[in-house]
Amino acid sequence: MITQAVRLYGKKDLRLESFELPQITNDEILVSVIVDSMCMSSLKLVNQGEDHKKTPPDLKNNPIIIGHECCGEILQVGKNWQHKFKPGQKYVVQANLQLADSPYCVGYSYSYTGGCATYMIINHDVLKQDCLIPYEGKTYFEGALIEPLSCIIGAFNANYHLKPNSYDHVMGIKPDGDLLILGGTGPMGMLAIDYALGGPIKPKNVIITGRNKEKIEHFKTLYPPRNGINIEFVDVSNADNQLALLKSKSPKNSFDDVFVFLPSQELVRLASQLLAFDGCLNFFAGPQDKNFMAEINFYDVHYNFTHIVGTSGGNTDDMRSAVKLIESGAVNVAKIISHIMGINKASEITKIQDTIKGGKKLVYTHKCFDLKNLESLTDSADDITLKKILNKNHGIWSKEAEDFILNYLPDIEP
């Protein structure tokens, strides 16, 4: 099977290449990838190359396929897994394998197992960790966003609070509590907002900060209050005193759960100052600087039982929860999509994705077309048709839009 894949050869050395995949063994599965969702973690991977903790040591001679937020169809199943999987099934992959003896993960470590490809091999590491998950959703793009949603679920699950008068931990955000998301107007912040409103544990108040007034006004239309939860978006771009401003947004002048979505020392310090008694600070942002440090209030850690947690990806249980939420429609991940492209543009855009404003960027791996910003489509025939489809759904990506891409835009040449 010939695949076309984006492979990493070293720091900032990404190449779209066509090559032959080996025949699968009895312990492997061959799949087609339909959509790969671009992750900012891939930018960190590309910038660090062999210095990244999840890459093999010799990328120059053993390049890896990038991409770990993907969805497609199973094509061929090795003998040892035919009892569990069958050709034609849709699938998603939990990239965070959590191997006992290795940091390797999908999209970071393997020559034939990565999502930014037309076809890939699901290897034994993925299968033995139960990280290939059947998916019955109606679209491929929602499947490709299950992995990032699972990261949000994992973060919410990692928070904890204490049972009264005990040291027993109650895992998760505080029910009926006050929740603050600092820097939450990016794509992962958007998923966190949707999960806070539609997840199993309901806070009473959700406050989200951002620095773009236009974007905040748009978010108010995307995320109205629901399930009895109050929600407020706060523009802090001109705030002289963020601490006082945000304290005024909580009845008790503090928050039970504070999520930090940007790797900022200032935000970490601010989050620490806003914690309630038994409050939990979740540092969700993944810094590229391995020596990133920030100031927190250890007086409160000692006397007010405040907690600091962080996660890097979800686990398989989080992934399965995300599958159920998307299949049921409890969380609408389509809102976070801002750009689409064919695999021909994936190498270029991966390296500059942090400079492109907007939300999630989807790669339709079997297709060949330039990057399209859904908010500024051109007057070409294809874009005019796409605009008409998007206008039916208030500008939000949809199954109809995806079907148009899959059925009418040109395929990548072998």
Image (cartoon, rainbow, N blue to C red):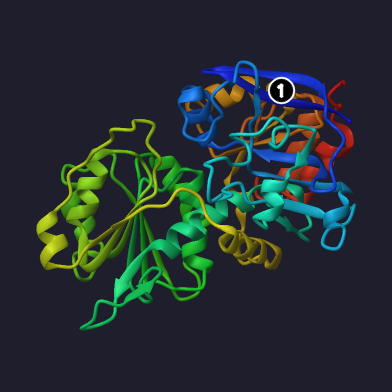
Q: Quadrant of the N terminus?
A: top right
- What residue is at 45 percent from the left and 48 percent from the top? 312
Q: Secondary structure at mark 1?
A: loop
- On the picture, is 71 further left or further right than 53? right
Residue ranking furthest to the bottom: 165
Query: From what the image shows, is residue 86 above or below residue 11?
Result: below
* Residue 238 visible in the snapshot: no
Q: Which residue of the protein is positioned furthest toward the front in this rendering?
A: 101
Vertical order, 91 against 64 (above or below): below
**Residue at 69% across, 30% down:** 111
Task: Name the residue rendered at 59%, 21% in the picture.
Answer: 59
Residue 125 percent location from the top left of the image? 67, 47
Total numbered badges shown on the rendered structure: 1
Residue 35, by quadrant, is top right
In this picture, residue 45 sits left or right of residue 137? left
> Compared with residue 247, is residue 170 higher up or lower down, i.e. above or below?
below
**For the residue marked with disc 1, what is the amino acid?**
Asp
- Percent position of residue 70, x then y: 69, 43
Whether residue 179 is visible here, answered yes or no, is yes
The front one of 128 and 247 is 128
Give the residue number, with chain letter if any, for mark 1: 370
Residue 191 vertical placement versus 60 (above, below): below
Name the residue: 53% across, 28% down: 353
Quadrant in which the C terminus appears: top right
Q: Nearer the viewer, residue 259 or 210?
A: 259
Q: Quadrant of residue 3?
A: top right
Question: Residue 411's x, y, as percent?
Answer: 86, 27
Mark 1: give few (<14), some (14-19) or many (20+) Cα within 10 Å. few
Residue 358: x %, y % from top left: 53, 36
